Image (cartoon, coloured by chain):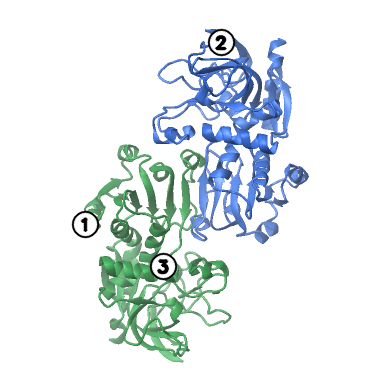
Chain colours: A green, B blue
Amino acid sequence: MIKTRGYAAHNPTSPLTPFTFERREPGAHDVQIEILYCGICHTDLHQARNDWSGSIYPMVPGHEIVGRVTCVGGQVTKVKAGDYAGVGCMVDSCRHCSACNEGLEQYCEEGPTWTYNCKERGSEQLTFGGYSERIVVEERFAVKVPASLDLKAVAPLLCAGITTYSPLRHWKVGKGQKVGVIGLGGLGHMGVKFAKALGAQVVMITTSPAKGKDALRLGADEVLVSKDSAAMARQAGSFHFLLNTIPNPHDVNPYLALLKRDSTMVLVGALTALDPPPQGGSLILGRRHLAGSAIGGIPETQEMIDFCAAHQIVSDVEMVPMQAVNEAYERLVRNDVRYRFVIDMASLKQV
Amino acid sequence: MIKTRGYAAHNPTSPLTPFTFERREPGAHDVQIEILYCGICHTDLHQARNDWSGSIYPMVPGHEIVGRVTCVGGQVTKVKAGDYAGVGCMVDSCRHCSACNEGLEQYCEEGPTWTYNCKERGSEQLTFGGYSERIVVEERFAVKVPASLDLKAVAPLLCAGITTYSPLRHWKVGKGQKVGVIGLGGLGHMGVKFAKALGAQVVMITTSPAKGKDALRLGADEVLVSKDSAAMARQAGSFHFLLNTIPNPHDVNPYLALLKRDSTMVLVGALTALDPPPQGGSLILGRRHLAGSAIGGIPETQEMIDFCAAHQIVSDVEMVPMQAVNEAYERLVRNDVRYRFVIDMASLKQV
């Protein structure tokens, strides 16, 4: 076993504190990664605080992991020692259901093994995430990261990136399409970058006029303030696709009205009740679709990383030391980050 | 002008009463139809009672119309005098938007002209529906009905029929698919017949075990009682498509859980708020779709009538005289009809 230092939550209300645990020795198909950077996803905070219930403690959060491969098992072909690699939300899945067979491990019919707050398959061993020195993972669940990318700004691609990239690709967003990205946060700012790089006309849809200038800098062609009902009415029925990144319950009806006939709004952030509820008529009139999408499979995550390398796309990040994670959580609650906190794991060594 | 007798609602609370009004003389593109039968749609009742607000009085309801063509304008080619013809929910549309150009007049971007409770395009003249002796309509908005079909049982096809046929075709329901039809009423009983004729394995999903036997008679392969949570859990993730005909607000989450990954539930009945609200997670987990569909375009309505002729499909109806329309409405409120009331318009002549 490999002694590993990290930070953990021990209950829903106390701050995260230093925590030492053990990782398995790498097997024939395993990759051992020295973690350089780990993004802070809003999910980390929800899970650490048991907001969705079902949290298991001690919990080492973190599923936006980038690092250097330090050793690989004898059967590993995807990466070699010295390469850079990433790990996202999953570290295992059943590998035999139709979803796994299609490389859509996030929809594994038996449920994927999450990078943290989960148990290893067929074991009581907890999984521990990226707020730590290193991780050992089967090569299937690692992706190769080109050294040409700014590694610290790659970390959020492993969750925020793939979560927005996957639906844009699945619904074939591209040239000649008017695409709205709803909500400008960790997910939304990646949605704008990807939709633009895919060739779409991109409209940033936000409640906050103050975010407009930044949206244009990120690549949006236009900003639509959702609280401006006249502006919303002018754009009714004009969008080919909407990527809805709002993480909280909200009224989807005004957004559905923006869709052209036979078009789709995809939810990637709002897991809980859509309250106030959608009107059936918002879907029936115009044969519109409301759909959802969860992160992305591992092959598509690799495709996204390669797409980012080709288009020089990374996340906009603010670096924090491991010791400042609790303050970062407080700022996250206040939406005070543009657009993703990333932990510099070198700070852990300085303790 | 052609003096025409019918029945009308004059305000939201009084019964429908005899009413005489005028139809236009048929123009070059018009078809004049002696109405033989008119189905009673739940919409008639909602509109007559101003349940959705915006009702215009006097109102002659009825948009499930079948009759005999008595004369046609000089430019008409679709039907000739002596033929049988049907008229559904629409009698006009803008005819130049993308929807109209694709034969999807129900999604006309300027709004279709509804068969009743509407105004003729560019005029203050009210449209009057099928609870009447005759109708004059442009041939584009009439469909030809083969004499081989039981005409009285054809009437409901013009709304209940096309409303269920269109989404089954649009989402390509057919052989090798497991399809659920939710709700066994005027729409649901047609959904079962069509889905079966299209080759699908059909599961009738109902709150009421008492309806099971009838569902099997209509062609369902299986009955799933939605209040049986163990039975629902056994079928989780197994449906390729769900046609949801429930007309009232209801919890869609248990139905969404029945869908396979990347599959769709289409609402055709519930126009108002989906309360309790859907969970975002019900869509995100499994990349599921919630969509809506409204009736069908005129070319597809003709296709459906021809499909019915080829497969000898009609609606299950209970005949009522025009004079009994108010009693029929009361029974409709109590769900006491299997599965559609149809007015025998010959009764109007006996007054």
Judging from the image, mark 3 belongs to the subunit labelled A
Give coordinates of residue A100: x percent, y percent.
52, 70
Q: Residue at label 3?
A: A300
State how far apart marks 3 and 1 are (Cα). 27 Å
Q: Are dots 2 and 3 in contact, CB under 8 Å? A: no
CB atoms of marks 3 and 1 within 8 Å: no
Under mark 3, the amino acid is: Glu
Which residue does the numbered mark 1 point to in the structure image?
A217
Residue depicted at 72% across the width and 50% down the height? B221
Q: Is residue B269 visible?
A: no
Q: Do the dots labelled 2 and 1 sit on one chain? A: no
Left or right: residue A104 compared with residue B229: left
Where residue B3 appears, x then y in whole percent?
Answer: 57, 8
Is residue A164 in sight in this rendering?
A: yes
SS for dot 2? strand
User: Dot 2 falls on which chain?
Assistant: B
Percent coordinates x, y for residue B200 in the rendering: 65, 50
Query: Mark 1 falls within which chain?
Result: A
The quadrant of the rendering that contains the C terminus of chain A is bottom left
